[in-house]
Image (cartoon, grey):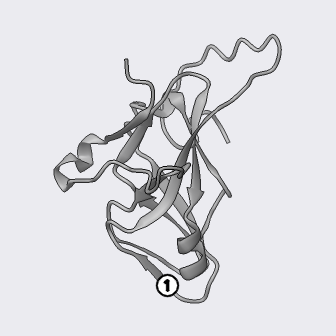
Amino acid sequence: MKKRGFAVVSAYQPAGVALPQRKTKHSAGYDLAAADTVTVEPQAVALIPTGLKAYMLPQEYLGIHIRSGLSIKKKLMLVNGQGVIDADYYDNPDNEGHIMIAVFNPGPDSVTIEAGERIAQGIFYRYLVADDDEGADAVRQGGFGSTGF
């Protein structure tokens, strides 16, 4: 049984999207790259598709962190500081679990991210739950914002 990893979403399989890799023996994160070229306008938010989805065990999530090189060189930031990809996001009916990186451009100039450019890192984490927490009975029905705002 597979425990955790990445797969390419069906819409991007013909595009040859590569699965993320750790770049060194002791790297915590798997580098995620842009699947398409995206321009982030000044003072705007953009969703950058990765063409990927992530599977993991219950009580795990994939933390999304912007690559320091991208934030320093291109002055971009993650909209929410850190993204959280829940285990039940995988293969959801809304978007197949497609990981999109939400970035904000606080600067005065447009910034273009090229397809194949590494933009974020994904780190798998385990989490704890409170005593007597059985969890909600609801089953995820969609992607972004599907559990409410």
Badge 1: residue crowd in 10 Å (few <14, some 14–19, many ≥20): some
Q: Nearer the viewer, residue 123 or 138?
A: 123
User: In the displayed structure, would residue 131 be above or below residue 34?
Assistant: above
Which quadrant of the view contains residue 43? Answer: bottom right
Residue at numbered disc 1:
110
- The N terminus is located in which quarter? top left
* Residue at horizontal 51 percent and vertical 23 percent from the top: 57
Residue farthest to the bottom, as pictured: 108
Can you name the residue that lies furthest to the front here? 25
| Residue at point 60%, 89% (across, down) | 108
Q: Residue furthest right?
A: 131
Q: Residue 106 at what x, y percent from top left? A: 64, 78
118 vs 115, nearest the viewer: 118
The spot of residue 134 in percent (x, y) is: 71, 11
What is the secondary structure assignment of the residue under circle 1?
loop
Identify the amino acid type marked 1: Ser
| The C terminus: image quadrant | top right
Q: Residue 56: image x %, image y %?
A: 48, 29
Q: Is residue 80 left or right of residue 146?
A: right
* Position of 95 relative to 115 (above/below): above
How many marks overall? Answer: 1
Where residue 115 appears, as percent x and y from the top left, is 32, 68
- Residue extending furthest toward the left: 14
Question: For this rendering, which residue is in front, 23 or 148?
Answer: 23
- Look at 32% across and 64% down and name the residue there: 36
Residue at point 51% right, 59% down? 120
141 left or right of 137? left
- Kindly indicate the quadrant of the structure image that contains residue 98: top left
